[in-house]
Amino acid sequence: MKKPPVCDGVDWLYGDIVKDHFFNPRNILLNEKEYVADGVGVVGSPACGDMMAVWIQVDRGTKRISECKWRTFGCASAIASTSMMSVMATEDGGMTLARAKRMTPEAIIERLGGLPDRKYHCSVLGHAALREAIKDYEESL
Amino acid sequence: MSNIAVSANKNIYLDYAATTPLDSAVLEKMIPFFGDEYSNASSMHASGRRAAQAMMRVRREVADILACGPDEIIFTGSGTESDNLAIKGVARANRDHGDHIIVSAIEHKAVIESARQLEKEGFKVSILPVDTFGMISIQTCLSLITEKTILISVMMANNEIGTIEPIKELVRAIGAWRDEHRQNMFPMVHTDACQAAGALSVDVRELGVDLMTLNGSKIYGPKGVGLLYKKRHIRIDPLIVGGEQEQSLRAGTESLPLIVGFGEALKRAENSRKKESQRLTLLRDYFTKSLLEKIPQAIVNGHRTERLPNNIHISIPHIEGESILLMLDKLGIEASTGSACSAFDLKPSHVLLAIGQTAEFAHGSIRFSLGRDTTHDDLDRVLSLFPGIVSRLSSISALTAVFS
Amino acid sequence: MINGEQKNSYVVRKKVIQSPLVSTLSLTSVDGKSHLYHSGQFITVYFPELGVPEGKAYSMSGAPHEGGLIITVKAMGEFSRRLCAMNVGDIVTASLPYGYFYSESDETTLVMIAADIGVTPFRSIIMDSLVNNPQRKIILFYSSRIYEGLVFKKEFDQLKKEHANFEVFYFVTREKTDDPDITNVRMDVRNVLGTDAHNNIEAREFMICGSISFVGDIWKKLRAEGVPEEAIYTEAFFSH
């Protein structure tokens, strides 16, 4: 019978924060059919192995993002990136749209504690999905 | 969403196709050569002669299993090195006859990259396509052969999707082509049998191949040792030159412990082959059937019957391979994937591309490969946990979302 | 479907070989339609014959008023080598213009920081800004490993002479050159922020473009000097 290996804390591919957002993702939207969104953004494609959908709600008064829900098809980095992006967009009362547009992949990666370079595009896509949702909202006004 | 349970139980290793644990009986045989029997087999003194004798013993035992002469065996440092030596060494040494090589689309990267290197040297390479089950067509292969073809390489069994290729029939067909075209030797046939050893017969007389690659790490032997069988009289350019070891075909002080370990592992693998294949086949079929029942949207990759006894390879739509693996890993289950996101170069598995896998499925592929320690209970545990992983990732996936 | 994912056919109208590895291609839509874009945006080029569904992004180096879609490509991988080997009349499949790499303000001083071929979107932004917003102060910090890697240098030097509001600073890190304009050291963020580093940060916006590690490194260093996140735009060139 095999003993479970001793883990010395130096892990595989991902740090603790990334793993946390992968195993316990925040703000997933499970009931998308009933959800009323102010803006929806979809980026990526199954062919590319990464696809993200983001639904936002914007507080009319404060112009801040009150909710940022999502679904992601992709690897752990993709799932963790969208989850962290959604947390950044809604924490502390929520980002204003102007501030949310200024979110960068670098900021997402910093909050995640780092990602391997070859996973950089996952954060790019996370940021793009949010931008598309904001664009969808602004075009509907 | 609910938390993922962490495994309190033992690790379930289902990645035997990647590598196997070292059999303790094999280690026993290796230890003296890490200890008191440390001499160089090329040395003239008594301890050196003992080392040389030990090597000769292993060489003879391996030759018996392969049904070839001891002089037809070249020990190398890995299966990859053997593949490199077979493809590049044979091509370069026989260039006066021709400059055309055929390799199957699902060969191990060691074969494909070796062929690519030869292209840069001016050789012509044809890729022999496979069908959706990963099987080559002998007819198609024959249609690719020209008067300049010197070497054809088709693996005995594919490491990813488990498909077993018709090597014996291929060799016969090539033999018939040679007779028809009054060719003595060309084209020659090489087969990478790293995954096949321990499951299929590696008797080169029966197979009829001219060259064959084997390695230690897939048969419960040590890593860092491989073998190339080369029929007597085939000219080959060594890759690694220096001393006269391995008939000057592969220089370097031989690693006695690794070679002895390899020999012992191969012996054991051959002895238990029939029984172990039967046992694994039953487990494999049980596992595959149960997986498909629990996850009806999954598809099986590779041939259903002409397949390695220990290989299960499936693709699941809407979810991605690396994320499946990480969730399995957290539960103590170790498997592998061919998804692009998991590869260092972000390219999807060339094997999945070669069998025409669509993008939707290619990203969600998982390989489970069974081995000596795999029990029915292990598989039941995986079967009880895997559907939960699939449904969790499916609910997270954007591909299952409905957009109004 | 968003612009970045629509596929369009373009024909190469003009090709300029800037250096052995770098070529500029002017593309127009085969169907004759012109596609508006912001300076700083890119198109994604596809080569399905390579057997991969993904494309690679190339920033427009030409400003919208220069007509068509002009991209400048350095031959470094399969896609870029194919692009550089194309000739006038060849057809290429690519997306419509896409991306968010452009300043949303008109008034701030724009500080652009580029490494090697990362300068491409900045040429578009500079040309556009000098024509459409001549009051705006714009500065380019451009780093390359070798002197020849400074694409568009002659053009930038000329623009510097003609426009008081445009400054450019070059850094060559692996070679020694005699050109007095070149600083033969690694670009330091303190060069970028200047002597009044911590004053006037609010009036400035920073845009960084280059490899993933270059962009990440400069981003971290700017942040460490107190530049707020909202003042930094990034575009990393990566293979996907």
Image (spheres, grey):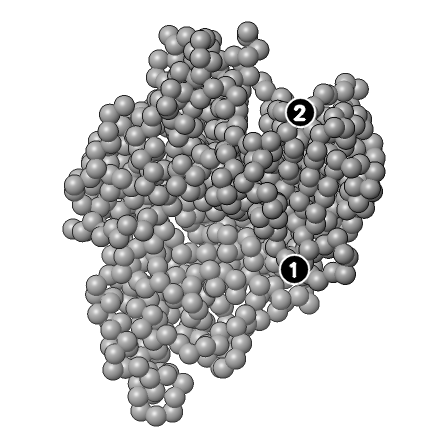
C-alpha span from label 2 to label 1 = 36 Å
Q: Does residue A94 sit above or below B202 in this rendering?
A: above
User: Looking at the picture, which amino acid does disc 1 mark?
Assistant: Arg
Towards the viewer: A69 or B365: A69
Identify the residue shown where x is 24% and y is 67%: B27
Chain for disc number 2: C
* Residue B343 % position (x, y): 46, 44
Asked where in the image residue C47 lies, by quadrant, the reply is top right
Q: Secondary structure at mark 1?
A: loop
Tally of numbered discs: 2
Which label was assigned to residue A25? none
Query: Which residue is under mark 2?
Result: C106
Towards the viewer: B140 or B107: B107
Q: Is residue B208 visible?
A: no
Identify the residue shown where x is 57% and y is 43%: C197
Towards the viewer: C129 or B201: C129
Chain for disc number 1: C
* Residue C182 % position (x, y): 72, 54
User: Looking at the picture, which amino acid does disc 2 mark?
Assistant: Asp
Identify the residue shown where x is 73% and y is 21%: C35
Q: Secondary structure at mark 2?
A: loop
Q: Is residue B241 visible?
A: yes
Query: Which residue is under mark 1?
Result: C174
Between disc 2 and disc 1, whose residue precedes? 2
Q: Does residue A112 sit above or below A65 in this rendering?
A: below
